[in-house]
Image (spheres, helix red, strand yellow):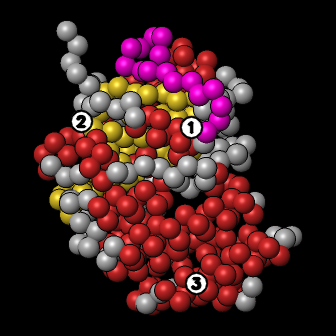
Amino acid sequence: MSTPAAVTVIVPGYNVAPYAAEALESLRRQSMSDWTAVLIDDHSSDDTARVFARTADADPRFRLVRNDRQVGLGAARNIGLDLVSTPFVGFLDADDVLTPPALERLVGTLDQTGSDFALGAYVRLRPDEAGGYRAGEVQPWVAASTSPERRRTTIDEHPDASGNIVAWSKVSRTDFWVRTGLRFPEGRLYEDQVVAQQMYARARHFDTIPDVVAHWRVRADGSSITQREAQLNVLEDCIAAMDAGLHVLESTGHPLAAQARIGQMLRMDIPRLTDIAHRHPDDAYRRALGAFTRDIWSRAGTARTEVDEASAAAVAAARLW
């Protein structure tokens, strides 16, 4: 008789056939075996559904769902959430990979602490000279959110956790999603940012783990969402997501976390987007970024002291548009 699964991993994918097999193999290589996975093919036009189907046929822990139309990442994750019957739930995008101890570490910690969710560190998986991919180092903002290990903390005690805004570095108690009514926004990009801040704001306690639990792929063909930020519609969704997540923290009475998140935007997001704007042929791009920068600067309090010289120059430039 098989052991009931402890955690469901929701794996949505759209046209990710070159990467999906590696993502699914990273699940099969987990050091804990009592997991199940919901594979959601979001009406792909490539071989994603076939890769998913082969894996599901070979391993009963995988369940395949095929969408008859493309609904987007947020809606696909929500479809998966409706199918979860295990005590814990996590996420994996089908072009990324989990490290072998990821589920054991995250679920095991939650078993010990009783917290609502646990988050771990992650690194970028970048193309290398040989045509493959190489994992990088844990970046400072990731380390700030997850290190050192903390048990049963809160966003007020650990405001830097607000910088961990991705879905696939976390495992949660399923009843936390049910109890708080959490769902992913649909029809937009960067859908996990507002959900992350809702999780921090609504959690009774959460845990942080400094171990790397996921490798986030930077696709060699440049098709990842974050590699398309020069598109105006992508910028608009990026700005809307950052603003919505920040509003969650501000409106629910977590000012330290809000300032920590603003500091991250001023140090990282606005300088990165400003570099794109300087080269962008469309004035609408610069105007959108300029309006957002002025708004964020007006909401910054203690975060202003964290702006270094390079970031200050980017903020100054963006505020002119």
**Which mark is drawn over residue 87?**
2
SS at mark 1? loop
266 is higher (above) or lower (below) than 201:
below
Q: Amino acid at mark 3?
A: Asp
Query: Residue 2 falls in which quadrant of the image?
Result: top left
Query: Residue 33 falls in which quadrant of the image?
Result: top left
What's the CA distance linking mark 1 and mark 3?
A: 34 Å
Q: Are marks 1 and 3 in contact (CB under 8 Å)?
A: no
Kindly identify which residue carries mark 3. 295
Kindly identify which residue carries mark 1. 95
What's the CA distance linking mark 2 and mark 3?
A: 41 Å
What's the CA distance linking mark 1 and mark 2?
A: 25 Å
Can residue 126 be seen here?
no
Q: Which residues are magenta?
A: 56-71
**Which mark is first along the chain, 3 or 2?**
2
The residue at the point 41 percent across, 14 percent down is 59
Q: Amino acid at mark 2?
A: Pro
**Which mark is first along the chain, 3 or 1?**
1
Q: How many residues crowd mark 2 within 10 Å: few (<14), some (14–19), many (20+)?
A: some
